[in-house]
Amino acid sequence: MRDLSYKKRADICKNPTAKKLFALMEQKQTNLSVAADVTSSHDLLELADMLGPEICIFKTHIDILDDFTPKVTKELRRLADKHNFLIFEDRKFADIGNTVSHQYRGGVYKIADWADIINAHIIPGPGIIAGLKEIGGPKGTGLLLLAEMSSSGTLAKSSYTDAAIQMAESSPDFVIGFICLRKLSDNPAFVYMTPGVQLSAGKDSLGQQYQTPESVIHAGSDVIIVGRGIYGAKDPKSEAKLYQNAGWQAYVNSLT
């Protein structure tokens, strides 16, 4: 059972992006994020437009596009505003503060100009948060820390996870939560996002372990992240509706 609804947690958040996320989840009645791991700009934008009404977050790996141009992220930003979802660039920053600040702000992708949410490994220490906050803080964007992962044999567990929680608690105005498998903190302002979700539990040939929307939400997570289960389906929109309904119903059940 959850202590607070998404709506009430929105009022607690210090970070503008976290506040917006909880509010739009309640408004749209969705806790679904689609992981659009496609390599074509056309496919990426088509998915964003098609699935936008069903999702709260559109997760990208912008560096896997074979035909990237700045026009892609400009159009993606327009679609996010049209359909009221947030953009999460799954960059997984993992370097010293000075380097990640350049990676976030500049280069080819200029991630800070269009992404609402980014994420980072904690291996470099708290300096990585400081470097990213230097760029994202003034923009009101949010950072997720990778506290746990859904792949078999991951090292992101135990003391590593504990360290991620401590770093997040030290910067609650910029760190909005975690990529994880369950609820990690008593702070209701943190959001928990879990990848590797499918309608049926199992695993793939590369060690990715899948959980169901119900099991993920029951474990205390807030956002279910679904990739191939949606974009690889014959009818992605219909499949997204199934996941949206399953995730939202699991959330509603968790409140009672």
Image (cartoon, rainbow, N blue to C red):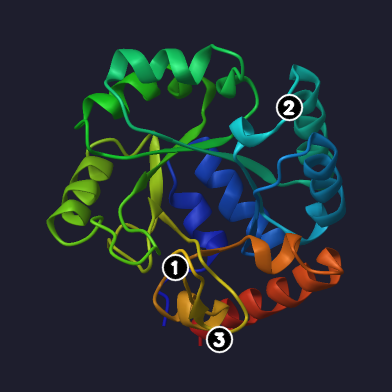
Which residue is outermost to the left? 159
Between 187 and 134, the one nearer to me in the picture: 134
State the mark number for residue 193.
none
Q: Is residue 230 left or right of residue 186?
A: right
Give the SS element for disc 1: loop
Tell me if mark 3 has few (under 14), some (14-19) or many (20+) residues whose alpha carbon lies within 10 angstroms of its own. Answer: some
Q: Is residue 234 left or right of residue 219?
A: right
Q: Amino acid at mark 2?
A: Thr
Q: Are marks 2 and 1 in contact (CB under 8 Å)?
A: no
| Separation of residues labelled 3 and 1 (CA atoms) | 13 Å
Q: Amino acid at mark 3?
A: Asn
Residue at image mark 2: 73
Q: Nearer the viewer, mark 2 or mark 3?
A: 2
State the mark number for residue 221.
1
Give the SS element for disc 2: helix
Please say if 192 is above or below 241.
Answer: above
| Separation of residues labelled 2 and 1 (CA atoms) | 28 Å
| Separation of residues labelled 2 and 3 (CA atoms) | 36 Å
Q: Amino acid at mark 1?
A: Ser
Give the SS element for disc 3: helix
Q: Nearer the viewer, mark 2 or mark 1?
A: 2
Percent of width and height locating residue 235: 87, 68
Q: Give the mark, 2 or 1, whose residue is nearer the N terminus.
A: 2
The N terminus, quarter of image: bottom left
